[in-house]
Structures are given as structure tokens and as C-alpha cells.
Image (cartoon, grey):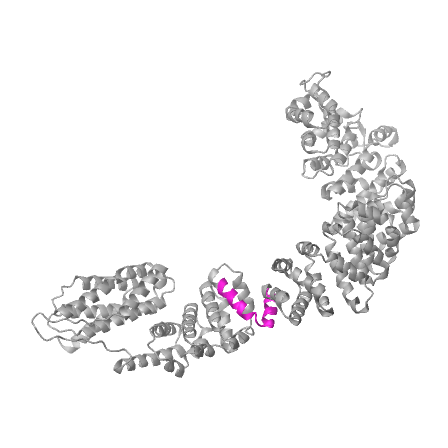
Amino acid sequence: MTTLESEEIHQEDSIDAASRTFSQLLCDLLQSVAHVNSLPLNRPNTESKAFNQFAAFVSKFSPILVHLEQNESTHTAPVRMAVESLEEDINYVANLIENSSSETPVGQIEEVTHNLGRCLGIVLSASLEISPKIKDMIGALHQEMIDAKFDFDDSYDNGDSEIEITELNPVEGGTVDRIFTDIDDVTLQLKNGNDEALHIALSELSELVREKLVPDGWLNDRGIVSILLNRLGSSKHDNRLMIILILRRLASENDENKEKMSDVGALSAVVRSLTRDSEERREAVGLLLTLSEIPRVRQRMGRAQGCIVMLVSLLNGDDSSASSDAAKLLSALSGNTQNVLHMAEAGYFKPLVQYLKKGSDMNKILMATTLWKMELTDQSRTALGNEGSIEALVKMFNSGKLEAKLSALGALQNLSALTENVQRLISSGIVAPLLQLLFSVTSVLMTLREPASAILASIAQSESILINKDVAQQMLSLLNLTSPVIQYHLLRALNSIVDHASASKVRRKMKESGAVQLLLPFLTENNTEIREVALNLLFNLSKDYLAGELTEQLGETHINVIMNIILVSTSENEKAAAIGLIGNIPVTDKKATEILNRLHLLPILVSLLGVSITTSTPASRWLIGSIAGVLVRFTVPSEKKLLRQSAELGVIPLLVKVLSIGSPIAMARAATSLAQLSQHSLSLSKAKGSRWFCVPPSSDAFCEVHDGHCFVKSTFCLVKAGAVSPLVKILTGKEREADEAVLNALATLMQDEIWENGSKTIAKASGVNAIIKILDVGSVKAQEKALWMLERIFRVETHREQYGEAAQVLLISLAQKGAPTLKSMIAKILAHLQLLQMQSSYF
């Protein structure tokens, strides 16, 4: 064969090799491995041992190659180059074995083995997503082949003299020149190579660093660390990860390498990797943790933008390894108070609380002041409370000097906005010292009174404050002796106290000590916040007054003041409190009714209600409930003039709307007013005969319940007002507060003359089952009214047939377990259902 022909064949082989897919390449390599293992070894003893050892290494390639073929994520250019090198070296040794005429130096086999090991190292470095099991297998085989020795001490069978074979030290002689030439090429690609070339260079550098084949001097001379850091920010994910892994290895070797990575720019480049995917974040935080061993690096690390924020994020993340390293690094950085403040801003408060507990006086003040000024979320307040900040701050307040007391109170004021922390404050015993502080006349302590009063206002939201006897009385006595800010906080505290369910004794004591007269001047206060909270406090105090008492306390002068607030205030809460205060005047107080009617309160309330039912806010719902409470006064059955006035102003349709949108108490009040109006519908319907009409009314005006012509404004008819269905719906709901009022309203449709028509109308609205339900879930009074209605409903045979079975189980259960007062009515109903003789002695 001519030289030209040989070159042409070689070119064809190269083209074929380049056109192979990665899977085909791996398949060819597997065949080469099998071929090496099948070759006969007709060689001298030493050479035979070397070939046997080489074949043993090669036989371990098969599972690795199979895994690479199945995992497409490994089909990258660097891995392909490494696999091609494996194939080339294996085929080379196969040719040596097959060529029986040549004598192969054992050192040559050893060098090929080491080359194969290095190729495996590149495969390991470049394959990022292989399974841990295969990764361990590659790593073990890589190390085994790198360390392989082929130094056999044996003789040939023909009696030739013993041959000693020694290994060539890879860092001596010509080998070191080859490595340094590779490093120069690697350095060039690290600096300027594109992504693919950089990946190959990083793989080779990783292998060289791992095997310690490059002296530190060469790495220093070429500025490898700086080059890697420069490429870190602009590289793709795989390359960034490899760079960080190499940097971690270099940093772990000596402090000199750490120093090279310690300037703020370098640290910032690494910090940016904390925002990447999970694996890169994990390695980056590990690198930063290693670098933090140097004090100077820790100082700079805290200044790297975003570093502490990202560390806190990792600390709270799902990656346990990254979280653990982040915790260690944050602990290392917490020696710097500025870092601790940054951690707090990021929502990590443990180091800050540690300073509160064990820091110097100045550091305690710094941390407390930070908490005072910081905008905290409830989540942050919870974390701070759990870490023990409340106890540390209370201790600081009790034992510190003026500046410490002030900063501690400021922080406690911020933390006390959370209910859980309020309980901690009460448990700490701080209430008595705060009150003592408010009574203090020492000028130096005056600055502490405002935060102290604010904390008391927060603490008062917990019913536990009532364990401090006479706390309300003490606050009352301070009201006229303090500044407006402190007055505001004390009024808030008092309002919270009297609103507690178990505060009836406190309310009584306050009224006996003249609290109402003390509070009334605040109703003319220009400070709207003080006026509103004082009005709220009066509203809560007025709940327990008897007829005449509250009117006497208020007087017509202050009722006028309250009316003015209703007219001019822009706050729905303030209007609601003012109207609620008037609503707390007992309905039986006729003098109050006369005053309110003279002041034209009714049309004002109707107008306000019309606006309020179109919105849905907590304030508007409270306002609706307050208005509904006062309307009960203007619909008292005995006040016929007020009834007509209310109906003509359009009260009834508004009350019907309240049944659907109001709070349970607003629904109950609306139902009460409707019941009071509906009591007159029967008589008004009969009185409005045809003689009243010049033109006969339409058939739509006829009411099947009242058996006459009904109109909402003139006969107050629930049926024509469309109130029956909303009333029934309340009974089917989960809230029970309005049951009795609703049943009273529906019962007006079952008066003696109209009970049969009324029961039919209620049945059409699915009301019978709703009434039966009350036997199971209602209060005793509601059960009484439901039984009264069912007794009349079950007089009708069709109702007995349709609803009797559903009712009888509940009726029998109620007869056995219910209140004794219910038994006679139950007996009547069971008799209607033919389950009991009317004269049964059981009842």
C-alpha cells in the first residue's frame, strides 16, 4: 500500500468517527472493551501480568459506559472527547496485545492506564447529572488507575536475566514539560475560550488540581484564581458550577488561595451564585463558608450586596445541606453588629436577640433601637417573640439606665402589636412597672410615659390584664393629668378592658366612680382620634344602663353633641359608635325617644342606612348594626305615629336588605323591627277596604295571608315586602343569634285569624323544615316559639303528611332532654301527629 493510499484510508476513518452519534461511539467502545478481554496473552510472564492487570481495569468500564449511553444529559462535547480518548488508548493496547512479534515495555502499558484514568476524571468532572452510584464507581476506578503500578519483579521462563521495570515520575523529566504545555493551553482557554472550550479547559484543570499535578507556583504565575472569578459571572450554569468546585478545592488547600478570593468584587461574584439553582447555591455557600475562616474576609463578606439576604433565604430553604452551611456562615458573620442588623432586616433575628441577652450595654441599646424603628410584620414579631426578645427587653427596661429603658420600651411597643407577644408581656410582670412609670413625676422619666401608655393599650387587648386589680381605675385617674398622646393610649386601653366579656364588674366600678361624666368632655375634643376612642369607650360602658339612667347621665346637651357627630363625622366607625351609644338607651325610655324624634334622628338614620347597605366593610357592617338597633325604638308597636313615619320613610325595604347582608346582631335587630311592624298588618289590611280607593287596587295588591289588599308603606306587610324568604334563610344558616327575632317576625303571619294562610306561605318558602331545625339547634326561647308555630302548622293535614315524619324524632328527643316548659306544647304537636293522646299523663 502506498503512503497516499494510507493517508486516504486514515482520512476516511476520521470522517466516520466524527459522524458517529454519541450512542454509536459508546457502542463501539463497549466492543473494544470486550475485544481486549477476549485476546489471548502469549507473552513473557511480566508482560502477561501487565496485560492481565490492564484487562482487569478495562473490564470495569462496561457498566459505566452503559449508564452514559442511557443518560442523555452526559452527551456533551467534553464527555465525548474523553470517551474518544478512552477508545483510542484501549484500541492502542489491543493492537499491542495482538502484535505477537513486538516486545511491549511494561511502562508503556502503565502510562496508557494512567491516561485512561485521567480521561475518566474528565468524564467525572463533565458529567453533572449522573447517579451518585455511578459517580462513585467512576471516581473509584479513576483513582485506582491513576495510582496503578506495573512494577513486576519476575523472570522470563527461558532463564534470561531478571528485568527490573521502574515507573517514570510524572513530575520529572519530559512529563512535566507536557503538563506545563497543557496548562498553558488550559490557561488560554480559561481566559478567552467560548463556552464549550471553557468547559473542556475546566474539566482538565479540575483533573490536574485534583491529582496535584500542577505546582502552586504555576497557578499563581498564571493568575488562575482571578481568571476563574472573572469567568464566573458570565459563564453558563455547568461552567459556573465547575468553577466554584475548583475554587472550593483551591480554597481548602491554603489561606493564600483564600486571600485571592477575598476582595469584595470576587466575593460579589460568588454571592451571585447564591441566587442560582440548588446545586450551584449549595456549592457557593460552601465556598463562602470556607473563605469565612479568615477574619478579614468575614468583614468584607457582609458588605457584598445581597449576601446576607440570600444566606437568610438559604437558611429557610428546603436544601438541608445549604441551610446548614448558611446557618454556620451567618453565625460566623454575626460577630459584626452591622451584619446582625442586616440579618434582622432580612428577617433573621436570632443573632440580634443574642446581643439583647448577652451583649454590651451599647450593643443592647443598638439592637433595641433597631427593633423600635423597624417596620415589623406579624411573622417577624412572632419570630422575635419565640426567640425570647420580650423577656430580654423587659429585663433591660427594669434594670437599665434611661437610654436603655427608652429603647427597650420602644422595641416592646413595636412587638406588642401581636397578640401572642401581649401574653408574654403580661407574663413578664411589666404592667405594674408601666403604671408606676405613668404616675411618676420625675422629669427625667417623662419621655418614657408615651411608649409605656402605648404598650398598656396593646396589653389591654388581652383579657389577662384583668388579673391586675384596679388597673382600669388607675388609668381613669390619669386621664386629665397627661398629654393628648398618652390620653389617647389610655382611652384605647380602657376601651379594650371594658369590652372583655368578663369585665362587668370593672364596668360597674367605673360607672360608680363617675367614668361617664369624666369621658363626656372628650366628645367635643378637636383631636378626632381621641374623640372617636372616647366615644367607643362610652358606647361600651353604656351597655348595662337601665331605663332613664343613661339619658340622665348624657343629658339633652350631650345627646345634641352626639347627634352632631352623626351628622358631620367622616368616619363610619365614629358614626357607628355614636349611633350605638344612642341605641344603648333603653327603648322604654320615652323621654329619650321624644328628644331623638325632635332632633329628626329617624330620617338621618334612614339616609345613612341606604348608603351603608351598598358597601361591605367592617365599619359599614358595624354602622348597619347600630342603625338597626336604634330603628327598634322607632318601630315600637305602641308608637303608631312613629310606625307610620318609619314606613313612609322607606324603612321596611331597607330592613329586608339588612336580613341578607347584616351581621347576626344586625339581622336580629332588623327582624325585631319587622316583627313590630307586622303585628299591625292584619288590622291595617282590613281597615284599607275598597272604600278607601277611588280606583280599585290591582290583583297584585291582594295578600293571601291577610286576605285583603296590602301595601308595604301602609300595611307593613312582610309578604309584600319580600321578607319571608330572607327570614327563613337566616334559620337555615349557621349563626343562631337572630333565631328568636326571626321566629317572632314569622309568627306574626300566624295570628289567630290568619294562621292557616300564614302556615301555607311559610311552607312555600321552605320555612317548615327550617323551623323544625330550631328544635335541634336553637335556644330554649327559640324552641318555645318554634313549637308554638309548629303546633299551628301541624293542624293542617297536608303539613302533617309532608313534615310530620321529619319532626317527630326531634320532638320525642326534645320531650326527653329539653326544658320542662316545652313539654305541654310538644304533647299537643305529637297529638296532632297521632303519636300521643292529647290527655297523656306523660306530659
Residue 238 in picture, x, y percent from top left: 41, 68
Q: What main secondary structure does the magenta stretch of the protein show?
A: helix
Note whether 638 is above or below 574 in the view shown: above
Q: In the rendered view of the protein, which quadrant contains the N terminus?
A: bottom left
Q: Specify the farthest residue to the bottom.
A: 221
Residue 38 in picture, x, y percent from top left: 17, 61
Residue 425 in picture, x, y percent from top left: 69, 57
Tell me the residue at 68%/27% (across/down).
817
Q: Which stretch appears magenta?
A: 323-347
Note whether 620 is above or below 804 in the view shown: below
Tell me the residue at 29%/82% (across/down).
177
Residue 87 in picture, x, y percent from top left: 24, 68
Per the image, is 325 magenta? yes
Per the image, is 411 magenta? no
Tell me the residue at 80%/39% (across/down).
652
Q: Nearer the viewer, residue 745 or 394?
A: 394
Q: Quadrant of residue 134?
A: bottom left
Q: Is residue 737 visible?
A: yes
Q: Quadrant of residue 776?
A: top right
Residue 533 placement, left or right of 283: right
Q: Nearer the viewer, residue 373 or 510?
A: 510
Q: Nearer the viewer, residue 359 or 728?
A: 359
Q: Specify the farthest residue to the front.
A: 399
Note whether 581 is above or below 762 in the view shown: below
